[in-house]
Amino acid sequence: MTTTIDPENLPFISETSVSVEIETEGMTLNIGPQHPSTHGVLRLVAKVDGEQIFNVEPVLGYMHRGYEKLAEVRTYPQITTLVNRIDWVSGFSNEIPFIAATEKLMEVEVPERAKYIRLILTEMARIASHFVFNGAYPLEIGALTPLFYAMEDRERVLDLIESVTGGRFHPNFNRIGGVKPAAGAGPATKKDIQDLPAGFYQETRDSMETILKACDKFEDLVGGNEVFIARTKNIGVLPSEVASAYGVSGPILRASGVKFDLRSTTDYLPYKDFDYEIPTGENGDCYDRWFVRLQEIRESAKIVLQAIDAVPSGPLQAKVPKIIKVPEGECYVRAENPKGEMGYHLISEGGLGPYRLKIRTASFSNISVLPWLLEGVLIPDLLAIMGSFDFVLGDVDR
Amino acid sequence: MSFGLELAIKVGVIAAIAPAMALALTIIEIKGSAYMQRRPGPLHVGLRGLIFPIAEVIKFIQKEDIIPTKADKSVFKWAPAYIFISVFGLFVIIPASPTLIVRDLELGVFYLMAISSFSTIGVLTAGWSSANKYSMMGGLRAAAQLIAYELPLILAVIGVVIQAETMSLVGIVEAQKEWGVPFVIAGQGVAFVIFMVAATAEMMRVPFDMPIGESELVSGFLTEYSGIRFLLFYISEYINLFVMCAIASTLFLGGYHIPLLPVEWVNFYGPLVLIGKTFALAAILILIRWSFPRFREDQLQNIAWKILIPLSLANILVTAVMKVVF
Amino acid sequence: MPKFKLRIPGFLKGMLIVFLNLFKKNVTVNYPFEKEKLTPRARGVIALDEEACTSCMLCARQCPDWCIYIEGHKELQPPSRPGGRERSRAVLDRFDIDYALCMYCGICVEVCPFDALFWSPDYEYSEYKMTSLLHDKEKLNEWMETVPEIQPLEN
Amino acid sequence: MDQSENTSLLDSLSSNFPSTTNDFDTLKIFVKEDEWVQAATKLKDEYGLSFFSWLSAVDWENDVSVGDPPKENVQPSFEILCCLSDTSDGNFVILSTTIDKTNPIINTLVNVFPGASWHEREAYEMFGISFEGHPNLIKLYLPDGFEGNPLLKSYELLTREVKPWPGEVDVEPMPESDEEIKGDDEQ
């Protein structure tokens, strides 16, 4: 349901034609690691003339935990616990590409039921991540109430994830070869099967209904508001060539008009069995980036609704040795993370842990385009554009 | 009664009413916004949170009042006083009934506009003297915004003055009583909207709260203030809200007058009616605060200079023509 | 002169939504007085069943954070059948989990081959001093009561 | 995997580039060091692989002080990987070249893909590889006073040395414990 006010012919309130006659020397403003709206510890050193910025230089590394080095001293089951802490807003979907890469190297066939459960939980993680964006972005622009409504709806999805996996942010539910089969390895705990709990289907259907209603509420409350449109329309327009040259992926690339979604091209999860559209924006400004993510919540809710009815029965995990040694080989698997393309380049030399694990995160490339995009922009727009990129510092600094 | 005693009583009454009204509006805003966001708001303070503002006042008084080393000490210390004085000054001309008024100035509206532009100095000095880039930008934004919205505020009121043919607020309310219909219906509806928009900008409330833009400027010119100085800013913000809504209801909604009630007891129901109308207006402003994002300051200037001022000039023209015709 | 196209002004609908939310029930769970219903699989704390543990050190090895410390020794037990030889049995001296380091990943519970470790959703064990987050085996045994039974599953 | 079906890209690539491998559905092209930039521009212009995914390096070393050494010993060198993809049907190619460790210099891809600058800065500070012609080759993540290149295999992890491993077995292993547990060597 598009908004009642069609975005084309609503004229832009004002254009920022700030003509500088008075010669004022620039000021370097540290939008520093400690700032209310840098989504974490990102520091922007901005050369500012009055309110207009003419050069922004992000300083990274405040959140660098050195995951690629840690991965080399960990065994494969331990890395999944490490990896879902990269983008902590969408916990579950970080593990998927790594597990898929290991399974590909070990040539393990994942049972259907495990694939469907993984798909349902990934789409729920996407809904949770996009709700955080839906709550935090209006906050950047000054509206305080959408945050509370977004967090309330997100609570529903997190409770569902917790009822299945036990953890809300860091579910750690994926095992190589499938999903966590049982609570333990002893005679009694082996029988405590970690399958979907009773009443899960009914609860998910109710939650998805309320989430679809919440999306319409957000469309009126945030998208319809003229002040929001004035603050986000035609601001931070990112052409698609620049986006792909910098490796910007995910909702931001789709907002620039590129209809490219890794869910439909690679088959790391059975997305082919469901029909869903890929929302794209027209002119790649902040409004489109916000609107594409709102549509994606709707699509994910639809996918989950279809997926619950079609979950096949069967084992939860394929036959996998207790001590996992991945045979020699090298492969790169990428997945559609809520923030963009997340990929793992896994080089294994047959040891207990990988020889080298390159983690390609979405937000790192997404914000590498910011210095180009923030030339000559006013400070409030800097925050509107940065907010629309929905990055998480763990994702950026790894 | 000698003038001194009368003056002392009046100042005493105002010194009691103004903070009480500010605390009442604070609790309405905090509890109201909490319920709007489906959370209970402050609960454990006492009486299910209703005495929260008193707790806050005490908290701010006993908090340490930090003055940054590089700040311009004397200017930094005096900044909150300017705003406090300008906001208190406005109480002089608000009529709770034809006699219940500090002083019914002939040039009431003129006095009103002069005093209300005094707070700009307070905000600018606060921003400039805190030796902090963010508060300096907040101060400059505030100065530009307050000056830009001074004009529509004044031009909107001129329409009312033409229609009521007097500048004294009691006279304006009497004119509305004689017209039988409050001015907001009798031709001054547009002026009322302009006045409310300009008043929101004067009070630096959302959607015009760029000077205290939390997500951009940390908290604008208030960044370096703490302790009792921050309390002065905080209380004067809510007194400003009360005063502006009181003036709006006096000029446009008929102040202490209600058509049905008998005129003799105006001294009794007058203040209640005035406070009722003021709190209604304040409630609308509170609802606006929690459902709007924030403008960018160049959009804000555009709205002031390109929409509000031409509109208010047109309104004056129409009122003048109507005055001549009827 | 930018003009506002006022068909159904968006901000009025926005204000209506915020106004209607005024009358809806509050969502907050008032923590100390009302407690949120926990899902039985929530990973709150790890409980240890002391008899079952044979100090095989598998969980201490697999723990990514190195936060499980185990010491045990061997003991001779009286023979089960009269005349049989004594059986040597590993006895647990010390089994500490340092919850300051633990990241609740659950590898230890999964790896334990003797049903000694269980998850319990209880979470109210915050401390004033970080060192007292090191739970010894008596404390871990206490958590055993809070471990829920096996929950019914979807068909 | 759809990657392996579209053989059109595979055979058109293998015609132009000598050694392309496609195991585990990862299309990998080996190029000599000096053809690095031309290969990238060719891939970008002719094959439409205009999406710059990532660029990184691998430190091939025999005596490693961290993790497990490679299976058969390998000639010590840096392997530089650069992944390019297209934004239509999602196939990707990994461009790879090896440079020796004595003087690790390779020319930069910034003029072909502006997005490469941060990835190259990261490889510079993590491996010590310097990129010829990079506009501002300074540290990206690490604080200024940090010496050493962390991702080199010779760079040990300090905390693992300081803290004794709690998995130390001071009680004799269980008599009937199966072989696998014993084989679990120390990390």
Image (spheres, rainbow, N blue to C red):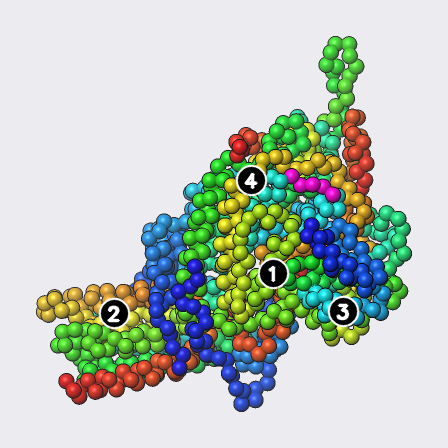
| Marks 1/2: CA–CA distance | 69 Å
Residue type marked 1 = Phe
Q: Residue at x 46, y 40 (%)?
A: A202
Q: Residue at x 81, y 31 (%)?
A: D179
> Which residue is more in the foreground, D61 or B36?
D61
> Which residue is more in the foreground, A160 or A105?
A105
Circle 1 chain: A
Whether tag 1 and tag 2 are in contact, CB under 8 A, the answer is no
Q: Residue at x 53, y 56 (%)?
A: A277
Residue B171 lies, in percent from the top left, at 17, 80
Q: Is residue B285 left or right of residue D94?
A: left
Q: Is residue A32 left or right of residue B64?
A: right
Dot 1, crowdedness within 10 Å: few (<14), some or many (≥20)?
many
Residue B304 lies, in percent from the top left, at 38, 80
Range of residues picked out in magenta: A107-111
| Label annotation for residue B13 | 2
Dot 2, crowdedness within 10 Å: few (<14), some or many (≥20)?
few
Whether discs 3 and 1 lie on one chain: the answer is no
Circle 3 chain: D
Circle 2 chain: B
Quadrant in which the N terminus of chain A appears: bottom left
Q: Which residue is mark 4?
A: A311
Q: Which residue is mark 1?
A: A260
| Label annotation for residue D42 | 3
> Which residue is more in the foreground, A21 or D131?
D131
Quadrant in which the C terminus of chain A appears: bottom right
Occupied quadrant, residue B236? bottom left
Residue type marked 3 = Lys
| Marks 4/2: CA–CA distance | 73 Å
